[in-house]
């Protein structure tokens, strides 16, 4: 392993139509254990593609991603093993509608980590309790509000005991009054030392919990720094104009 | 006036009774019905089972290839080549089976492929199973493609491989969604088996035909034949409907 870095990304590229469209155009990034990295940028800047290529839901055209010292872009790597350690939370929750909340949370640990049903359920219930949904374990996703669904999605990923959590615009599909409850869960998680990478439009969240903010545009990292540097002291014109539009 | 109508009704009733006795009671001809129903049901149920298993496998191969084409083109490897080959085989299978009449398939099975077998029932089961598989495959493929891609991604992001995602997450949802269409296919299958007489299987239709050949009476046997098929289809529909309600109840 190289120092403390949990994820090391080198010259990551994602091209469509044979290079005509460059969604990602040579990104370099190192993420250390315990960091909370927030990725911001205008829509179409490639931030979601970037996040989704970290667990290879998008296959990069070129470049390498090293996770826990293993090059996961190597075709010989068993990506499924590594995905178990990378939790992911989606914009549209993607809970399994045919399973109740408990089953949603325990199916992966039981089938993949071979944990006993009792242990998996005990753990799932404890996590649900923590995010204030202890009484909804037997409910089905269609019976929950958007904010509740997203909290379940977060704890579902946590049930696999991941090394890093990837958040793909976790609050963008929520009604405004539900954003807070999801962000609270994420803040708690950050305080407990979870390594997080989060694509979001919630600048308040970025300011409060991010250890590092990355500003992307046109498939490139334009600027990165502490929240203070990015929000109070932007250097590039593009970041300045982006911030002036959203703040 | 009233007397006349009454006599007529009694006449018809006596005539109906006589026709019924002639067609179904004399020489124990009802046996053609019961044996025929049993044969029809055996062929239908067995080929249904073959069709569903075959259909799910073919649909899984086809949609796996479709959904992962980008990954295979990028990563290549032996597995991708095998899958591409099987995808081609499945495509040919569906094209050929859907493009030729079931009677022709039945005759080819009977006279060419299984010419050495003497019992025609297994041949009929094989022919209808293989035939149904092609239709069921497309029904399931449609069902798989209709599942939100986020479900696949959620499964994959938890660490399930593609096949595990299919088995644990996608197929259970697909099954529920395709049940009404699948019921259609089962009904069609049940009725289509009425052509097995072509290869000397004595099913329900053939049995009725034999009765007609002996009694030269058409009306009653044919109407009874139609009613029995109708009844069987209604029972089948009711059973599938019950299963559907049971599967749906888990969502609310």
Image: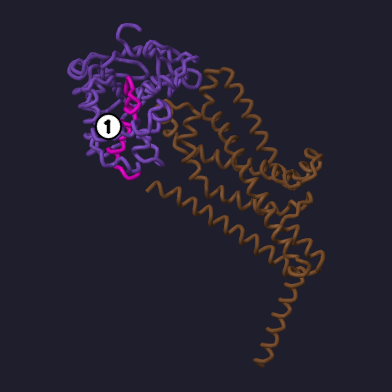
Chain colours: A purple, B brown
Q: Is residue B102 magenta?
A: no
Determine if residue B101 is in view.
no
Q: Residue at x 62, y 38 (%)?
A: B54
In the image, residue A105 sits, relative to residue B23, either above or below, namely: above
Q: Is residue A156 magenta?
A: yes
Give the residue number, with chain letter if any, for mark 1.
A127
In the image, residue A124 sits, relative to residue A166, either above or below, namely: below
In the picture, the quarter occupied by the N terminus of chain A is top left
* Image quadrant assignment for residue B231: bottom right
Q: Residue at x 45, y 32 (%)?
A: B152
- Count of marks, rendered view: 1
Is residue B251 rendered to the left or right of residue B118?
left
Residue B19 image point, x, y percent: 75, 74
Is residue A87 rendered to the left or right of residue B97?
left
Residue furthest top as drawn: A2
Is residue B131 rendered to the left or right of residue A75?
right
Query: In this orientation, which residue lies closer to the viewer: B236 or A229?
Result: B236
In the image, residue B193 sits, relative to residue B153, either above or below, namely: below
Residue B32 image point, x, y percent: 74, 61
Determine if residue A122 is in view.
yes
The magenta stretch spans which residues?
A: A142-167
Q: Residue at x 20, y 27 (%)?
A: A204
In the picture, the quarter occupied by the C terminus of chain A is top left
Query: In this orientation, which residue lies closer to the viewer: B86 or B98?
Result: B86
Q: Residue at x 42, y 33 (%)?
A: B150
Q: What chain is tagged by disc 1? A: A
Label 1 crowd bin: few (<14), some (14–19), many (20+), radius 10 Å? many
Residue A148 image point, x, y percent: 28, 38
Query: In this orientation, which residue lies closer to the viewer: B75 or B219?
Result: B219
């Amino acid at each position: 392993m190289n120092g403390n870095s949990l994820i090391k990304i080198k010259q990551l590229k994602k091209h469509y139509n044979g290079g005509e469209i460059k969604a990602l155009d040579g990104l370099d990034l190192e993420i250390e254990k315990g960091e909370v990295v927030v990725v911001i940028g205008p829509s179409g800047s490639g931030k979601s593609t970037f996040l989704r290529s970290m667990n290879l839901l998008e296959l990069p055209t070129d470049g390498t991603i090293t996770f826990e010292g293993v090059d996961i872009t190597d075709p010989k790597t068993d990506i499924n093993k590594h995905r178990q350690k990378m939790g992911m939370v989606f914009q549209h929750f993607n809970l399994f509608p045919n399973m109740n909340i408990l089953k949603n949370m325990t199916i992966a640990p039981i089938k993949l980590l071979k944990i006993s049903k009792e242990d998996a359920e005990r753990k799932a219930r404890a996590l649900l309790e923590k995010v204030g949904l202890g009484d909804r374990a037997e409910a089905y996703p269609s019976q929950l509000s958007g904010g509740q669904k997203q909290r379940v999605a977060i704890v579902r990923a946590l049930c696999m005991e991941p090394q890093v959590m990837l958040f793909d615009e976790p609050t963008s599909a929520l009604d405004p009054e539900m954003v807070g409850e999801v962000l609270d869960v994420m803040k708690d998680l950050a305080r407990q030392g979870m390594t997080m990478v989060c694509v979001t439009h919630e600048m308040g969240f970025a300011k409060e919990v991010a250890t590092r903010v990355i500003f992307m545009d046109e498939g490139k990292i334009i600027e990165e720094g502490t929240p203070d540097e990015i929000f109070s002291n932007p250097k590039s014109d593009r970041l300045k104009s982006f911030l002036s539009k959203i703040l | 006036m009233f007397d006349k109508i009454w006599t007529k009704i009694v006449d018809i009733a006596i005539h109906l009774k006589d026709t019924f006795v002639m067609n179904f009671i004399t020489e124990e001809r009802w046996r053609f019905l019961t044996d025929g129903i049993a044969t029809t049901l055996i062929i239908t149920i067995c080929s249904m089972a073959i069709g569903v298993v075959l259909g799910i496998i073919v649909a899984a191969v086809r949609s796996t290839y479709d959904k992962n084409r980008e990954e295979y083109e990028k990563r290549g490897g032996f597995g991708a080549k095998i899958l591409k080959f099987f995808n081609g085989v499945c495509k040919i299978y569906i094209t050929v089976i859907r493009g030729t009449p079931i009677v022709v398939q039945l005759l080819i099975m009977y006279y060419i492929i299984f010419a050495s077998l003497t019992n025609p029932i297994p041949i009929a089961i094989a022919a209808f199973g293989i035939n149904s598989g092609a239709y069921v495959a497309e029904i399931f493929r449609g069902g798989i493609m209709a599942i939100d891609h986020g479900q696949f991604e959620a499964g994959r992001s938890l660490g399930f491989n593609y096949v595990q995602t299919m088995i644990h997450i996608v197929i259970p949802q697909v099954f529920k969604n395709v049940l009404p269409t699948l019921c259609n296919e089962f009904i069609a299958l049940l009725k289509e088996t009425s052509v097995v007489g072509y290869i000397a299987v004595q099913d329900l239709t053939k049995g009725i035909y034999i009765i007609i050949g002996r009694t030269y009476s058409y009306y009653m046997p044919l109407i009874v034949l139609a009613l029995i098929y109708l009844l069987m289809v209604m029972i089948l529909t009711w059973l599938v409907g019950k299963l559907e309600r049971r599967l749906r109840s888990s969502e609310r």
